[in-house]
């Protein structure tokens, strides 16, 4: 389980290393705009399976996906005009700035458009969770690789998500590889402790139901929803 410190000075070097690991089907612990996450190529069946093995997570609970922009999101999911309006930045009531969902800490669940994704990405009811994060490292990776990436938290299923790198490492140190599958990520990007944050808020845009209140409050979500209906 290799570790690599990341900073503004070695960012390009780290990005190049990460790309090589991802292209080989590897899984990386990476800082995000919420908590530390497990990043892998969401179109690579071997890589996605490895994410589930590392998290010890059942395939009945699909994992969300990071996309680089709305265009990529539309390749994976069906997005109507109302849903697109929700995802598009809105001018606030004072006209001094924008309220936005993407890029940001909101995962949206939509009807999947494609079936050409590995097991564990699309749910039984043919839905997919998508998010455009607001974090330089991941956004750069998405632009260069031009593939959706897994966007699930870096923790063993049933254990808490974390912004603290020591807590993340500790969870995986005690889970070495076994004959039943992978137990550890291939690479851990160490960025110290992240700003305190909850995981992303999850909203099902097929019925506008909040499935998990996270970093963005229900009130904020309802305020944006009120402007588009």
Image: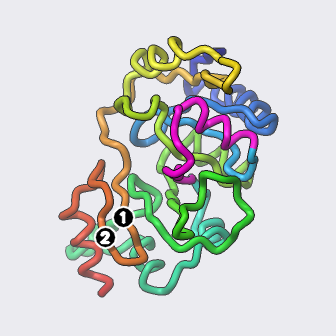
Q: Is residue 54 magenta?
A: yes
* Residue at (59, 71) in percent of width and height: 112
Q: Which residue is mark 1?
A: 203
The segment highlighted magenta reads 46-65
Mark 2 lies on a secondary structure that is strand
* Residue at (52, 51) in percent of width and height: 60
Q: Assign the C terminus to one quadrant of the image.
A: bottom left
Q: Which residue is mark 2?
A: 209
Q: Could you give the CA–CA distance between mark 1 and mark 2, rounded to whole angstroms? A: 6 Å
Q: Assign the N terminus to one quadrant of the image.
A: top right
* Residue at (45, 22) in percent of width and height: 168
Local crowd size for mark 1, using a 10 Å CA cut-off: few (<14), some (14–19), many (≥20): many
Q: Please indicate whether residue 120 sits to the left or right of residue 94 in the image.
A: right
- Residue closest to the far front: 180
In the rendered image, residue 198, in percent from the top left (x then y), is placed at 31, 41
Mark 1 lies on a secondary structure that is strand
Asked if marks 1 and 2 touch (Cβ < 8 Å), the reply is yes
In the rendered image, residue 114, in percent from the top left (x then y), is placed at 69, 70
Measured along the vertical axis of the image, is residue 5 above or below residue 95? above
* Residue at (31, 55) in percent of width and height: 212
Q: Please indicate whether residue 195 sits to the left or right of residue 63 in the image.
A: left
In the rendered image, residue 96, in percent from the top left (x then y), is placed at 27, 69
Q: Please indicate whether residue 66 sits to the left or right of residue 18 in the image.
A: left
Q: Quadrant of residue 187?
A: top right
- Residue 217, numbered circle: none
In the rendered image, residue 6, in percent from the top left (x then y), is placed at 57, 23
Measured along the vertical axis of the image, is residue 218 above or below residue 4? below
Q: How did the renderer colour the structure?
A: rainbow
Q: Nearer the viewer, residue 204 or 163?
A: 204
Measured along the vertical axis of the image, is residue 98 above or below residue 202? below
Local crowd size for mark 2, using a 10 Å CA cut-off: few (<14), some (14–19), many (≥20): few
Q: Quadrant of residue 175?
A: top right
């Amino acid at each position: 389980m290799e570790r690599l410190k990341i900073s503004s000075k070695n960012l390009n070097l780290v990005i190049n290393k990460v790309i090589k690991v991802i292209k080989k089907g590897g899984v990386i612990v990476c800082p995000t705009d919420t908590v530390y996450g497990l990043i892998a190529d969401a179109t690579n069946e071997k890589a996605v399976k490895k994410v589930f093995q590392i998290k010890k997570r059942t395939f009945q609970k699909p994992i969300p996906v990071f996309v680089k922009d709305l265009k990529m999101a539309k390749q994976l999911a069906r997005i109507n005009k109302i849903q697109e309006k929700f995802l598009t930045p809105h001018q606030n009531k004072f006209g001094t700035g924008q309220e936005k969902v993407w890029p940001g800490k909101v995962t949206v669940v939509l009807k999947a458009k494609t079936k050409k994704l590995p097991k564990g990405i699309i749910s039984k009811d043919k839905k997919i969770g998508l998010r455009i994060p607001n974090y330089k490292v991941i956004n750069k990776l998405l632009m260069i690789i031009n593939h959706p990436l897994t966007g699930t938290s870096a923790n063993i299923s049933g254990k808490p998500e974390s912004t603290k790198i020591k807590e993340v490492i500790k969870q995986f140190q005690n889970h070495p590889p076994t004959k039943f599958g992978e137990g550890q990520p291939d690479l851990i990007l160490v960025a110290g402790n992240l700003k305190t944050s909850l995981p992303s808020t999850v909203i099902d845009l097929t019925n506008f139901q909040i499935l998990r209140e996270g970093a963005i409050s229900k009130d904020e979500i309802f305020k944006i929803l009120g402007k588009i209906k």
